[in-house]
Image (cartoon, coloured by chain):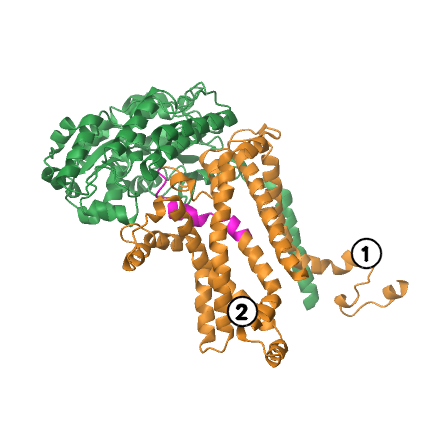
Chain colours: A orange, B green
Amino acid sequence: MATALEKPPVVAEQTPTAGPRTGFRKYWHLYAAISPFYLLFLAFGLIPVGFSLYLSFHRWDGLGSMEWAGLSQYRYLLSDSDFWSSIGNTVIIWALATFPMIFLAMVTAVMLNSAVRFKNVYRFAYFLPNVTSVVAVAIVFGSVFSTNFGLMNALLQAVGLDQVAWLNTPWGIKVAIATLMTWQWTGYNAIIFLAGLQTIPSELYEAARVDGAGPVETFFRITLPQLRPTLLFVLVVSTVTGLQSFTEAQVLLQNTSNDSTFSGGPGHAGRTMVLYFFQQTFDNNDFGYGAAVAWGIFLVVVLFSIINWRLVQRRGEE
Amino acid sequence: MRLSRRGLLRAGLATGAATALGGLASGCAVPTGSTGRNMVLWYWDGGLGDTVLKKARARYDSTVNLQAIKIGGYYRSKLITTMTGNAHVPDIAGLKGEDMASYLPNADQFVDLRTLGAEKYQSQYLAWKWEQGIADDGSMVGFPIDCGPVAHFYQYQVFRKAGLPYEPADVSEELNTWEKYFAAGEQLRKRIPDTYLLTDVNAVFENAVQQGSKRYVDKDRHFIGDQAHVRRAWSLAVEAKRRGIVSNLVTGTPDQISAVDDGKLPSQLGASWATYDIKNGNPKTKGKWRIADMPVRPSNNGGSFLSITKECREPERAFEIIAWMLNAANQASGYVDAGLFPSTPASYGLRQLREPDPFFGGQVTTDVFGPAAQKIAVAYNSPYDVALGQPIKDEIKNVGVLGKDPDKAWSDAMSKCRRIAKHLGVSY
């Protein structure tokens, strides 16, 4: 240790063994260089998060004085059937969006990975939906799913089926929101899968070919297992974003709700957890309960992330 | 002095850190209100007329620098965030009518306008509107900007073709009850197939509730949404559904807009500001519309206020500006600029409000909205009305759209209200 101190390092990274006493003094400028992120995170991330926890133990209308409420907000949360139904809606919409999305993204990625021309054009095109404003997309989808003049019903009628009042029936609403989310995320995740596909060593494929495996077998025995980390990443990200879906339902259904833009359409079919949080907080001015709902959402997201992780992990152990 | 690159970097970082720390430490030095000569006013797009703001700025330029800032997005949440944060709070703040109930319990955050001599202006304003700006403790928070009297918009030719009264005076007179209005809807559908009187049942329910002098929660924090006035509105809405006079369309969707264009939805119960919505949403229907009284009695929808926050350094001056900006002559100019229907009856006779409107076949719409504005009933607007009205509105929507059994829907709404009331500390 003493000898290490005697000869000062030329480059900081080369001496990870430097004593803790000298650590900060020696590297303070490095810490300073990365500090903006942490300061911003502290101000706009950690402090609000902490405050929302504090808020959830109070009753507050957003302007007046706060009133201590103990655990009553959480007790109400557990008995609030609207909150539970909003979890149900969110999960259904998430499932309706995520599984087709993963399938489509995988197919797209495999196709992109095979030798096609204008690869970069496709990559760009597939990424585009993800950087388009959700609000704009939701407005367009509102037209696509409208009853008499929508593209969707035109398609249904073209194949001889009946019209569906998409935005006026509980399942129609869920399907419409899920379709929007699928459309928006397929391209992005296809790019992620593509990156994953390209890390698979070609030796594996060569070996498989030598062993006489067909394309289907190769896909299931090599591509899919090798893609597991990517799949986990995609699943976790989709879960986190899908469970927080808000704008899609809010914009798509705002006309349906007469004076609350957060009520989620007929039968509350499109009322996601975050939409419910928003309604409680900003429509009802119930900031304390809104904070409790937000923490409820947090727990649900954590739970689903754990489930995802376990699922993908376990498959890896087999 | 020679500065090495590293030295410069270090100095720069140190300065940056010092500034950041200094900024944090001197957080309390952020001004709570406006600074210097500034008098800051917050409003939203269309909340005040541009001409009035320009004139006010010029008029008071010798004493204050009136800074009118148009706040975009979710106005109320931005205002309360600023007020709670206690930094850069505007001197004068616009308050939207639908948010009034949530500001009034916090009247201590605003200057009581009575202390600035507001009462001497009272007689110039609509009594019910004035009342809406006053908190339970009697202090006056909001000074009236505009109001939103609701009237019956209808398409002249369609009504004529269906054999219904079609001149505004006749429509006002003959369709003056919900029963006659609904009967007209039945006749309409019989004579012109696929034509509906109204878009949805909520148009009936909410207008019927708004017509009354009671809503969902009373002054004593007691739930009254289960009483006769709401039940009556509910059964009217159910009846509208049963008699088949409401469409299955959704307001604002391409379907509904084209139905309105085609005369398939020839009637609307809309507030004065809805004239702008129709002009923008259905420009093709120019000249086809007329305006008459709504059935039974007029109701109000919307209309906002100006307030002076407690951070204002010159409340007297601010009040002088407000009272001037919202006098009868300036309200008439606000009507021209932004469609703000005046809360000062003296404006109704002014030239700006007497212009025939070609979109409504040359009708002087003030002839309907003016008298309507003066007949509106005062209803107590509780801060809990939103939370406890929503379940009922949601359930009537389920009846209208999903065909849910009305009795089941009503009992579901009531059990939900009971639960929410308990949570909010409202007696049931």
Residue at 51% x, 67% y: name it.
A191
Residue stretch rendered in magenta on the structure: A240-258
Judging from the image, what secondary structure is the residue with disc 2 in?
helix
* Chain letter behind tag 2: A
Is B319 left or right of A93, judged from the image as shown? left
Tags 1 and 2 both on a single chain: yes
**Residue B382 quadrant:** top left
* Residue at mark 1: A20
Spot occupied by residue B369 in the image (x, y as percentages of width and height):
22, 31
Is A159 left or right of B316, judged from the image as shown? left
Residue at 62% x, 68% y: name it.
A226
Q: Amino acid at mark 1?
A: Pro
**Residue A76 quadrant:** top right
Q: Amino acid at mark 2?
A: Leu
Residue at 33% x, 22% y: name it.
B229
Judging from the image, what secondary structure is the residue with disc 1 in?
helix
